[in-house]
Image: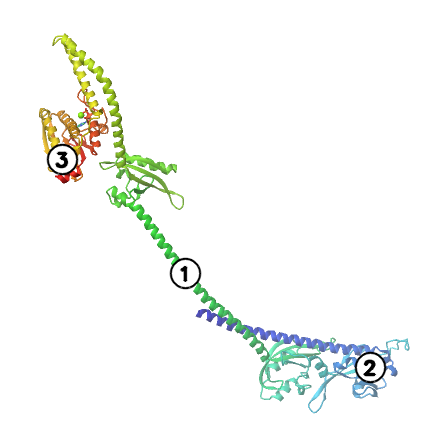
Amino acid sequence: MTILLGTVLVLGWMSSKRVRETVTDDFNQQQLVLARHAARQIENSLESIKRELFLLSLSPSIQYKESAFMGDRMKIAFSRIKHEGTIEMRFTDTDNKTYIVSDKIKFTTNKADSNDIECLNRAKDENLKGTLFMTKVTIIPYNNNGGKPFMKMAIPVWQVSVDDSHPVALNKFSGVMVFVIDISSLIESVVNELRSGKTGYAWVIDKDGTFLYHEEKSFIGKNAFEARKRKKPTMSFTRINEIQKEKMLKGQEGKSWYISGWHRGIEGEIKKLIAYTPIKIDEKNPDRIWSVAVVAPISEVEGAIHSIHLQQFILQAIIISVILFGGLFINFMILSWSNILEQEVARKTNELKKSEQRYRSLIENAEDLIYTVDYNGNFLSINKYGAKFLNKNRSEIIGKNITEIFTWPSSEVLIVMIQTVFNTKESKQLIHMVIIGENEYWFSTNLRRLWDETGNIYAVLGISRDITDRKKIEEHSYYTEKLASMGTLAAGVAHEINNPLGIILGFTELLLEKYPEGSEEYEMLKTIEKQGLNAKRVVENLLNFARHKDHKEELVDINKSLRTVISVMGNTIRLNKIEVKENLQEALPPVLADEGEIQQVFFNIINNAIYAMSQKGGGILTITTSYLNSDTVDIRISDTGDGMKKEHRKRIFDPLFTTKEVGKGTGLGLFISYGIVTKHGGSITFKTKTRDESPDTGTTFIINLPAARVATKEI
Ligand code: ADP
Ligand code: MG
């Protein structure tokens, strides 16, 4: 603000200086115009005098001195030019008689005086015929106070014109017509009204430096170089004298200033502006010039400047106020705007932060694995849940490849899909299996592309949901459905086979009685009977499964049931060199179940275990019970057999799936067991290891059954 004010002040000072110069110059230029105007008018006045003189010289009444008309003719001319300072007309003839017309003396004749004679003698010169001539300015004493400048203008008069009375021009010299001119009143008639500013005026000097006219009347007729000094001897008039001498008397035009001692009535050192220009009074004699000056005190200009300054001051004040208030207003607006803007930015930032937080927490806490990967399957990011799911720190995942996180071949499938998404621009949804470490999971995965600002695809966004449980339920219901349909099928098939089988076995029995023991026929029939009975057992088993036996529900002591089954199978166990380890948890909550069915499950599983171990000549059968929590009873039956081959593992619960030779397995044991356990709201799973996988081979079946709540309380 200070800088602004300073600038305005400096500019103001500069412009005021400039204004002063300009106004002064303009004022003086105006004075010069006035001076020129005065000069032209003086010249015009002299011109009209000359014209009148010339016309008069051509008048026959003058040339031929017709006394009757001569006076009138001269009076007419006089009346036309008396305003221009002509005070007398004198015609002097060759008889030295002078005819005079003046303001006071109307028309008189007189004997020529010496001046008239002098003029007459000069006019006689034939070379001057038709030519005007002027006398020098003479100062005629006037009042007591100096003199008046006079000048005569003359023309020789010859008898050259013709009219009615003088039909032939005599061409004789007649005399000289002289106009006596009061120069100061001639000039006064012109410059009287001239005003420069309020008080400025004009003065005129002739070639000799004599004042022909001045506002200060006492100066008229006096030498301009002396008159001033005489009026104010203490003052130096160097400047004006210089101007008069060097410029005005040399017929130059110009503008300047000087110091005067007075102006009109006022005395004192006054600076005056002066503009001057020459007056050409005789075109035949260009050297003969006067000079008119228009002068005015500098105060005239000061007044103008003052009013201009006032205007300028007001204007500046207005501009400064406008700038100040405008500046303040703009500042205020900027402030309030920036305030509003700040608030708005803060609000938006806050909103953004919040929405980012919301978004982040949404992603972080989503129960999905959310991650981005590049074309090669390297992790670029992963959410918290994802890292937790993979049981790793985020830093252990980011930068790693999918193949390092998921086990082959599940990782390969994903990479192929990711690259397909990159290449085909299509989103992909897939349900796939992944192996993380030892565990299998089922994922439902959505893959879509991510663009950066320039439209480049830089990543694929993956959202994977763990659907392993769902998959299990699906599988479960698959078995349940299979069971149901198998039941119906089995019932029908069993029935159809049972009858012909009965007939086959009946006839076989009859035929056996006809052949002696040891005969070839007898042995053949024995084989038929054996195989027939086998078939019958399968059919009975099927029928057992299919038959809707009455399902009992009682509180079953699992430990007791297991012991019963083991003791029933004791013989087989011993024969196969199997050691039994019982690891039974006492005070096991009972299970609400059909005891017969539960025992059948145990029987089937132990039977399989014995078979598996019998293949390698014995082993250890470990039976463990425990309760995981008050809700579930956990039963584990482990053998030290060779385990199940990988390709078989998926199918062991399938009906009729068996790896045993004909007659040894029906492929129904686990199928039926699965049906029973699930019917009781439990689950049956297994873990198995073959020689490739572990030196400790074997299989463990895990049966979970829901504990009976009421019973728990009773115990
Ligand atoms: P089966 O015993 O008549 O073959 P199961 O349904 O009982 O039919 O068993 C199906 C198959 O599961 C068996 O053939 C065998 O391959 C496999 N299996 C079952 N239990 C075991 C076990 N303890 N050890 C190794 N394999 C087993
Ligand atoms: Mg079996």
Q: How many marks?
A: 3
User: In the image, which disc is placed on residue 625?
Assistant: 3
Name the one closer to the observer, 531 or 384.
Answer: 531
SS assignment at label 1:
helix
Q: Which is more N-terminal, label 1 or label 3?
A: 1
Q: Nearer the viewer, mark 1 or mark 2?
A: 1
* Image: 232 above or below 295: below
User: According to the image, label 2 marks what residue?
Assistant: 74
In the depicted structure, whether residue 413 falls above or below residue 67: above
Q: 663 or 69, which is in the foreground?
A: 663
Q: Nearer the viewer, mark 3 or mark 1?
A: 3
Distance (Cα) linking label 3 and label 2:
170 Å
Q: Secondary structure at mark 3?
A: strand
Q: Which residue is mark 1?
A: 338
Q: Is residue 583 above or below residue 273?
A: above
Dot 2 falls on a residue whose secondary structure is helix
Does the Cβ of the disc 3 residue fall within 8 Å of ligand 1?
no
Residue 359 placement (x, y as % from top left): 33, 48
Indicate the position of residue 385 as horizontal and vertical percent values: 27, 44
